[in-house]
Image (spheres, helix red, strand yellow):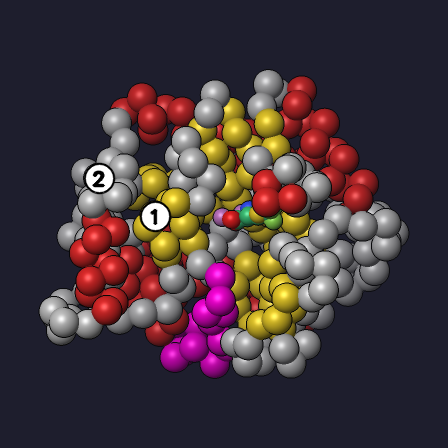
Amino acid sequence: MTVAPDTEIFDTARKAQFAITLHDEAAFEGMRKAGRLAAEVLDLMVDLVKPGVTTAALDKVAYDYILAHGATPACLGYRGYRHTVCTSINHVVCHGIPADKPLRDGDVVNIDVTVILDGWHGDTSRMYPVGEMKLKAARLVDVTYESMMRGIAAAKPGNTTGDIGHAIQSYAEGQERFSVVRDFCGHGLGKIFHTLPNIVHYGKPGHGVPLKPGMFFTIEPMINIGGYGVKVLNDGWTAVTRDRSLSAQFEHSVGITETGVEIFTASPKGLDKPPYF
Ligand code: MF3
Ligand code: CO
Ligand code: CO
């Protein structure tokens, strides 16, 4: 629980505390509705993801569902992004762009959706096996989901953002020998899509920002089978593993409560992780 007071990390963390919104009960209610809608979109994908389906078709289904429920896709038009969901296949780490190339048996794809409902953002992603899942992929997907849930379990008053990162890293790297992506992190959200605090998925106990009731943020670890190195392709979005090893990610939006944490994006159907039947 100690950190040298003269380090840059400490200074950044100290400043960040004053820029983080502590939300009230009405905001929790808004996030519950937005989170639920985002989770419904991902529930919808369960029966659709199969060999031969294009990610562009999945994007269209997500777009239609969000609009039909009085919400807006947050990614559409965000920093020039032109789609509703991100679809990140195999060695794509995140921000994969929906396209007309059909999914193939044995692929694993992350679908990441963010909705805006009544001004509140619900941001969540899950991994989907396409047809038969290979053993190595299944293990990576399991470990990535467990990493996210261990991070969520560490999200409570009295802990810090570093405790979340440490819970994830000590498990995914220390225990399971996979690697945690460093170049992308979770983020504060609410009325704003991406804000403070940054939730990096590695770290040391007690470091970073102290967690307080009313803080909203995502926990969205990206875990690679190989090294943690990532590069972004020429399209300006698609992030891939440098060694082309398999990568997986899950994401929930959460809120810190007086006693712990509330997950806003839990699946209403219990389809939070594969196998989905
Ligand atoms: N949903 C992503 C996240 O978890 C953000 C995607 S931004 C986009 O933060 F523009 F690529 F869609
Ligand atoms: Co996010
Ligand atoms: Co997301």
Name the residue carrying label 2: 213
* Residue 85 in view: no
Is the residue indicated by label 1 positioned so its CB lies within 8 Å of ligand 2? Answer: no
Q: Earlier in the sequence, mark 1 or mark 2?
A: 1
Residue visible at 39% across and 45% down in the picture: 195
Nearest to the observer: residue 144 or residue 74: 74
Nearest to the observer: residue 151 or residue 242: 242
> Which callout, 1 or 2, points to the residue nearer the camera?
1
Q: Image quadrant of residue 138?
A: bottom right
As for residue 9 lying within the magenta part, the answer is: no
For label 2, the crowd category at 10 Å Cα-Cα, with few meaning under 14, some 14 to 19 and many 20 or more, is some
Name the residue carrying label 1: 196
On screen, residue 58 versus residue 171, left or right, reads right
Callout 2 amino acid: Pro
In the depicted structure, whether residue 54 falls above or below residue 208:
above
Which stretch did the figure color magenta?
171-184
Callout 1 amino acid: Leu
* Kind of element beneath mark 2: loop
